[in-house]
Image (cartoon, helix red, strand yellow):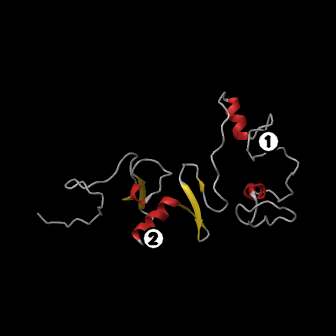
Amino acid sequence: MPHCEFPGCEREVLAHGLCVPHDGQRRRGSKLAPVRTDMQRCAFENCERTSYSLGLCAPHYNQQRRGQHLKPLRVVKAAGSGWNDEQGYARTTRDGRTVRVHRLVMEEKLGRTLDPSETVHHINGDKRDNRPENLQLHYGGHGKGVALRCRCCGGEDIEAVALERTVV
């Protein structure tokens, strides 16, 4: 794995050639500075995060504070493979821009780029389920829990077509 571009930092790269702490400094607009290396690790078994309070990392501390049993955290994807945004959609970087994964999957399925007015709907409502068979192309907005089907045959392979105007 490549190392952080900050002089003397040996951490793995997260984004923009920087490790997690240095990329955080960059995003906050702070001047890049050395990161503390004397931090303790979380006391929870096999947790590699840095201690936040009471010997636990922030997620484990919050579990304890809420009275929950401490449990392992979800596995984080490898650096550069993507992340989830605030709405819960998987995102990744392509050609220097951030894109939602479900749009990339639909573009690959259709063999073309999507128009900005086209939206991609998760049929089962799970924003993390980006299987092609769970995605449906819509034009404009769409409601949660709604999937388009042909009224006649029940098929999902449908397309929008322009209606012909007839003069009465």
Residue 140 visible in the shown view? no
Q: CA distance from mark 1 to mark 2?
A: 44 Å
Q: Residue at x 26, y 57 (%)?
A: 155
Q: Is residue 100 left or right of residue 23?
A: left
Percent x, y for residue 142?
39, 52
In the picture, measured across the screen, residue 75 lies left or right of residue 11, that is: left
Q: Which mark is residue 168?
A: none
Relative side of 135 to 160, left or right: right
In the image: residue 50, left or right of residue 131: right
Label 1 sits on a secondary structure element that is loop
Residue at image location 29% in from the left, 61% down from the top = 158
User: Which residue is the site of mark 2?
Assistant: 113
How many residues crowd mark 2 within 10 Å: few (<14), some (14–19), many (20+)? few
Residue 62 position in % (x across, y down) = 69, 35
Marks 1 & 2, CB-CB < 8 Å contact = no
Toward the top, the furthest residue is 67
When asked about the image quadrant of residue 91, the answer is bottom right
Q: Which residue is mark 1?
A: 51
**Is residue 19 or residue 49 the one in the foreground?**
49
> Which residue type carries mark 2?
Thr
